[in-house]
Image (cartoon, rainbow, N blue to C red):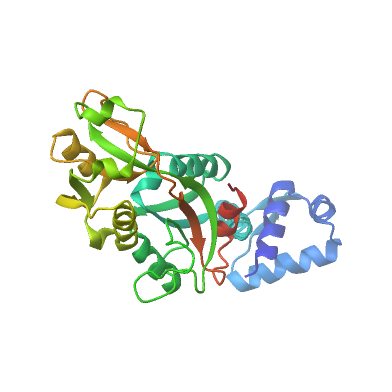
Amino acid sequence: MELRQLQSFVVVAEELNVGRAATRLHLTQPSLSRQIAALERDLGVELFARIRKRFVLTAAGESLLADARDLLRRADDAVRDAQRTQRGELGTLRLRFVQSATFEVLPKLLGAFRDSHPQVVLDLETMTTLRQVEALKDGRIDVGLLRLPEPGTQLGDTKPAEGLASRVVSRDPLVAVLPAKHPLARRRRIRLAELAAEDFVFYTRPSGPAVHDRIVGYCRDAGFTPSITQAAADVQTIVSLVAAGLGVSLLIAPTPRTDPEAVVYRELSDDLPPWELSLAWSPDNRSPVLQRFLQLGP
């Protein structure tokens, strides 16, 4: 049994006239009759009968008609879904992101993509830069939103950009995080060296060794090694500990919204390079959904 035979059967059943059905199908009457006869042989039943010069469906034909329509509809849906998948309109996008991306860039990217591709499934999860790089190279995720180290530096034991493509989507400054009642909180901008005597709440190094080491390096360039008395793996916990008066911190902007009566963010007057937030992906990944996502920008 072939789909074209079912299609011919449905049209004949709707017209109950071989001539009109042949016209609709752009076939000759003999060709259409042969298709119906072949379908009846394959099924072992009679689908049509003549009663008082009328062409009618048999009981078997009535039974087949509903199922044939359903099969043709599902076949059309399957073809359409395959075509839409090829165009990147259906499928799954496996995206991982560092936490600092959640405050500005990630909502904008996902909002724009959801508006234009509402039927793509989004598989989302926070993940450190190091783990994202490994997952991209292994093909376990499609795209990462991460912070690669400065050019020429290494991440772990491998060069992070090796084998991956990337595009910078944001350049963000480092800011000081202070309890609202801290004396320096009255200032709009402060120097890094002015924090030399403070206790620090810092990122745990395993959660982001490149970020941790780079911030410590800036402090040392400013003439001191930070006294890290508390550590946390996520930004919200760091901010909460600062608000509780357990120390100050340095975070990459944008930062989470907080009560200005509890904690404040202040610009640094030091000449520090911005932190680049990048999209990264494997050039070997030919996922149409990924290609659609990358076309959106920024």
Q: Position of residue 201 (x, y in %)?
A: 19, 46
Residue pushed farthest bottom? 157
Q: Quadrant of the N terminus?
A: bottom right
Residue 60 visible in image: no
Of the pair 101 and 291, the residue shown nearer to us: 101
Q: Is residue 255 left or right of residue 94?
A: left
Q: Is residue 219 left or right of residue 283?
A: left
Q: Position of residue 115 (x, y in %)?
A: 54, 39
Q: Is residue 86 left or right of residue 199?
A: right
Disc count in the image?
0
- Residue appearing at x 42%, y 73% in the figure: 138
Of the pair 134 and 40, the residue shown nearer to us: 134
Residue pushed farthest front? 223
Of the pair 295 and 130, the residue shown nearer to us: 130
Q: Position of residue 231 (x, y in %)?
A: 17, 51
- Residue appearing at x 48%, y 44% in the figure: 110
- Residue appearing at x 23%, y 39% in the figure: 239
Q: Quadrant of residue 22?
A: bottom right
Of the pair 226 and 280, the residue shown nearer to us: 226
Q: Position of residue 150 (x, y in %)?
A: 45, 61
